[in-house]
Image (cartoon, coloured by chain):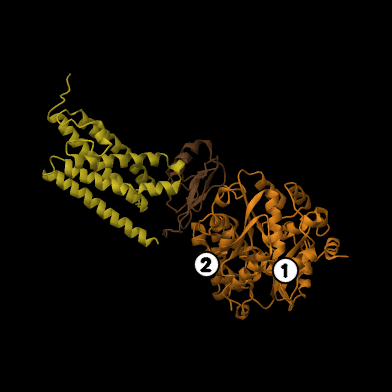
């Protein structure tokens, strides 16, 4: 299973990086940098939890159902 | 052992579980506001706020069930079970109980839609979740109107604290939201 | 020998055979020059496959494969012709739509009947009033079995991206969406949608008339047919030229009259393409594979010639600043990363880097590439990387010592809003 992020839905909450620091790192603006490799077996549960915890449902696995398109006017919190 | 179907025991239980449910609901609203406002501290990660919000909301359901259950069993006021979900189905304090039914329905809707969030899609879920801002004040009003000991100072004080707390955190949330534009 | 037969026999021009510099080609003249448009069915997709036609909008995807994936979809199909031409340095689509609109309309009808679509849209930016007038005139002359609607799209750079058009036509904003699903599965209002550049459709109009073997008689085995190249910059006769696919870049520059002054580099593929040093670029064939092999990109066939006296970094910094302002505003890494890159490039080009900017750019570039929903940020990073590679010595000098005299020269690369 591989993780991917819907960059339009993602607003940089950073919950995923807190739950899965082994695979997800925040960039200087708060958005997730995902490791390219597939999720190792021992982190699978944690990865599923991170996907469920994403406040905007932006973190996805590569067999996720595709949610209906998110249409919004580009609001982004400026991250320190 | 006989459970006393009438008398102060159940009545205390109803009031107590109602008050606790209101406190938990207030906590849930506060945590929800903090999640949306991306609150985090040095020792307080965001997933904690969010995880607590979910778990506390589920706890509210538990206390709500106890609150409804004790009310219905209590033969002193013969309130039918339907009154918990259908407004105006009770003859006792019809108006105030109706508010309780509305709050209960809204809460169930909020929890169910949140559990089915990935089927609904983010945008639909987000719009429905705004109902939380209707659910909480209705629950507070129900508590003030129905509660037979609202004249007790400590209950009033507690309710005012809840209202104050939500007011402060909601203001923080709005300011943070404007700042992020 | 009538004109249609003449076209069928020679190399180029093909699309531009009916081009008149005095007036747009009307329907009667169009049919006289190219011949009548034959009706096609589903089997035409096999012909397109055999012809080897690839998309002329920049991505170079095999057109037959795209058409087939739409044709096998479920439900009513839609064809979208992309005539927006968001790239400021490209004029080929504009040329086709103003001068040879009937080629494009023929292509739309052909594509629609082949995939089974009854609805088609021709997308053009809403501020192009002259273009819209010409299209209205052309539509008035025609009676097609397919309903073609000319759609006016907002004039932003990202609005002409494939998924933006699909979302806009479905009633949403003209901004890219995150795929899956792709347009051929679920596009305009959920229906399988074929999105093609107007030049690609114009080629279809001729393949329908003359066949796949005729199409393959020009160009290379791996990259058949002809293409429209927009050559501009420091050349004697900037303009749109029809060349065989695979023509070396130097020859394409030659058809535009050759360099007007000694050249330092060429920007191939537009602002989502890449810089190449002039001596490296000249022998490279104009194909997707050929350019990729030297670290470049064909894009939609634009070639801009940069003279030796200009500052490549200053030109690039200017374009990056423009592109940073053209994000859709949807994805954090693009919204924050592109302005940061623009800032760094401007520092390098105009103020000198104080020894730090090259390191900054090296850290920023991987944070921006491939992290958006569309290829906008990738285009910018590719442009910057190629600039730093092509003008590597200049970049080091700028970083250590300061800007060069080249930035005093009038900017060459066109941007919207220039006088």
Name the residue at 75% across, 67% down. C28
Q: CA distance from mark 1 to mark 2?
A: 39 Å
Q: Residues within 10 Å of mark 1 (few under 14, many from 20)?
A: some
> Which quadrant holds residue C122?
bottom right
Residue C139, above or below B158: below
Residue C40, above or below A40: below
Which type of secondary structure does the marked residue at label 1 adopt? Answer: loop
Looking at the picture, tell me which residue is in the foreground, C203 or B120.
Answer: C203
Label 2 sits on residue: C325
The quarter of the rendered structure image containing the C terminus of chain B is: bottom left
On the question of residue C23 being in view, the answer is yes
Q: Which mark is residue C26?
A: 1
Q: Which chain is orange?
A: C
Residue C252, above or below C202: below
Q: Which chain is yellow?
A: B
The mark that comes first in sequence, 1 or 2, is: 1
């Amino acid at each position: 299973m591989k993780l991917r992020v819907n960059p339009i839905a993602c607003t940089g909450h950073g919950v995923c990086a807190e739950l899965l620091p082994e695979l997800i790192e925040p960039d200087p603006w708060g958005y997730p940098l995902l490791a390219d490799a597939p999720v190792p077996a021992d982190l699978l549960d944690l990865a599923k939890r991170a996907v469920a915890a994403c406040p905007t449902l932006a973190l996805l696995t590569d067999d996720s159902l595709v949610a209906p398109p998110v249409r919004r006017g580009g609001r982004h919190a400026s991250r320190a | 052992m006989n459970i006393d179907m009438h008398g102060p025991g159940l009545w205390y239980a109803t009031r107590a579980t109602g008050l606790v449910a209101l406190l938990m609901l207030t906590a849930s609203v506060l945590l929800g506001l903090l999640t949306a406002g991306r609150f985090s501290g040095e020792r307080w990660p965001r997933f904690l706020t969010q995880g607590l919000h979910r778990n506390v909301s589920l706890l509210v359901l538990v206390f709500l069930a106890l609150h409804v259950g004790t009310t219905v069993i209590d033969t002193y006021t013969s309130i039918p079970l339907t009154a918990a979900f259908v407004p105006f189905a009770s003859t006792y304090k019809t108006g105030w109980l109706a508010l309780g039914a509305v709050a209960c329905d809204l809460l169930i809707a909020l929890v169910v839609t949140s559990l089915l969030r990935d089927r609904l899609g983010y945008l639909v879920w987000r719009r429905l979740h705004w109902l939380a801002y209707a659910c909480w004040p209705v629950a507070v009003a129900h508590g003030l109107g129905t509660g037979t000991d609202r004249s007790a100072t400590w209950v009033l004080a507690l309710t005012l604290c809840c209202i104050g707390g939500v007011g402060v955190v909601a203001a923080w949330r709005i300011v943070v939201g404007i700042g992020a534009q | 020998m009538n004109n249609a037969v003449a076209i069928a026999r020679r190399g180029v021009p093909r699309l531009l055979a009916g081009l008149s510099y005095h007036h747009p080609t009307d329907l009667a003249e169009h049919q006289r020059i190219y011949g009548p448009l034959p009706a096609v069915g589903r089997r035409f997709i096999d012909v397109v496959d055999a012809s080897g036609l690839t998309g002329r909008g920049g991505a170079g995807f095999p057109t037959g494969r795209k058409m087939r994936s739409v044709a096998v979809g479920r439900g009513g199909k839609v064809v979208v012709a992309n005539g927006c031409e968001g790239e400021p340095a490209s004029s080929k689509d504009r040329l086709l739509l103003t001068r040879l609109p009937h080629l494009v309309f023929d292509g739309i009808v052909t594509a629609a009947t082949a995939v089974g679509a009854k609805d088609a849209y021709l997308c053009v930016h809403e501020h192009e009033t002259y273009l819209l007038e010409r299209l209205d005139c052309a539509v008035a002359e025609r009676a097609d079995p397919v309903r073609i609607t000319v759609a006016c799209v907002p004039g932003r750079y990202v609005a002409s991206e494939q998924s933006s058009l699909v979302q806009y036509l479905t009633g949403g904003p003209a901004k890219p969406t995150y795929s899956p699903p792709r347009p051929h599965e679920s596009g305009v209002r959920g229906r399988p949608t074929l999105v093609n550049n107007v030049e690609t459709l114009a080629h279809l109009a001729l393949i329908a008339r003359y066949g796949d073997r005729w199409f393959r008689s020009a160009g290379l085995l791996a990259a058949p047919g002809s293409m429209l190249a927009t050559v501009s910059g420091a050349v004697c006769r900037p303009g749109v030229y029809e060349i065989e696919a695979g023509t070396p870049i130097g020859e394409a520059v030659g058809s535009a009259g050759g360099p007007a002054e000694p050249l330092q580099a060429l920007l191939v593929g537009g602002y989502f393409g890449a810089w190449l040093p002039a001596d490296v670029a000249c022998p490279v064939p104009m194909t997707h594979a050929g350019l990729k092999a030297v670290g470049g990109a064909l894009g939609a066939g634009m070639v801009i010639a940069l003279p030796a006296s200009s500052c490549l970094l200053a030109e690039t910094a200017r374009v990056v600043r423009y592109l940073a302002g053209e994000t859709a505003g949807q994805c954090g890494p693009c919204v924050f990363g592109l302005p940061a890159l623009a800032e760094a490039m401007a520092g390098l080009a105009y103020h000198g880097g104080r020894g730090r900017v090259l390191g900054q750019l090296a850290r920023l570039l991987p944070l921006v590439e491939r992290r958006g929903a569309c290829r906008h940020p990738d285009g910018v990073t590719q442009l910057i990387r190629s600039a730093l590679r092509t003008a590597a010595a200049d970049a080091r000098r700028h970083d250590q010592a300061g800007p060069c005299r080249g930035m005093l020269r009038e900017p060459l690369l066109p941007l919207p809003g220039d006088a």
